[in-house]
Amino acid sequence: MKRILFILSFSLWAASASAATLWNEAVSGDLSGNHLAPTPVTFTSGTNTLMGSMGDAPADGIPLDRDIFTFTIAPGFQLTAIDVISYSPRSQSFYAIAPGTSISITDSSGHLANTLVTDLNDLLFQMAGGSFSGGTGISSPLGSGTYTAWFQEVSAVVTYQMDYQVAAVPEPSHSMLVLSGIGGLLIRRSRRMTVG
Ligand SMILES: [Ca+2]
């Protein structure tokens, strides 16, 4: 009986510890291709996995499929990484993030940043290092707000998995609080000495 309970509790722990798939196009349907009406997806703390395919194959008569979705990072949380877990076939696919609930697909000046996906990288870190074309700049980690992402390939049909990592904004460490408190006391003391 104890053994059964142990297996049961371990299974429950393993299920809760595993990353939940947020959007799998094979199950949830194709993500929007309309930049003015992206698919809304709800991110939660932890790993948010998106799996899908996009792109086109004109020679095979497969029309262009863009993947565009909107997500929100709640107050007190931040996006710490956009990890490309799988990406095949390797190409140079365009990926962009804009603030708000839509994204321009003709003018990149309003993007936060965009980049070319070529390998299994952290796209947020990659874009924080510089945008490919236009863009006002993006930070890593990315703070709370509503954002729209656009992923597109024009020379192949690409399948991919991306893990969006969301975490609580860390509290200031105890040592930092103590140091800032000491700093404040010293400033007040020196002011009093100057006045006196
Ligand atoms: Ca798609």
Image (cartoon, rainbow, N blue to C red):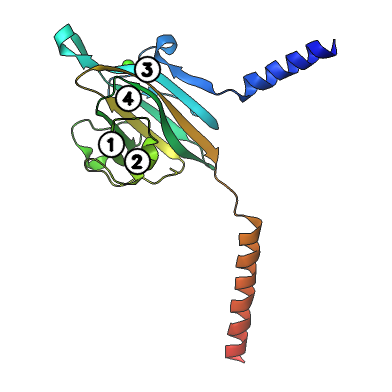
Quote the CA–CA distance across marks 3 and 1: 19 Å
Give residue 79's position: percent from left, percent from top. Answer: 46, 38
Q: Which residue is mark 2?
A: 126
Q: Is mark 3 within 8 Å of ligand 1?
A: yes
Q: Residue at x 62, y 66 (%)?
A: 179
Quadrant containing the N terminus in the rendered view: top right
Q: Is residue 17 above or below residue 96?
A: above
CB under 8 Å between discs 2 and 1: yes
- Three-letter amino acid code at the position of disc 4: Ile
The circle on residue 52 is: 3
Give residue 104's position: percent from left, percent from top. Answer: 24, 33
Q: Residue at x 64, y 60 (%)?
A: 175
Q: Earlier in the sequence, mark 2 or mark 1?
A: 1
Q: Nearer the viewer, mark 4 or mark 2?
A: 2
Q: Nearer the viewer, mark 1 or mark 4?
A: 1
Quote the CA–CA distance across marks 2 and 1: 8 Å
Give residue 82's position: percent from left, percent from top. Answer: 42, 33
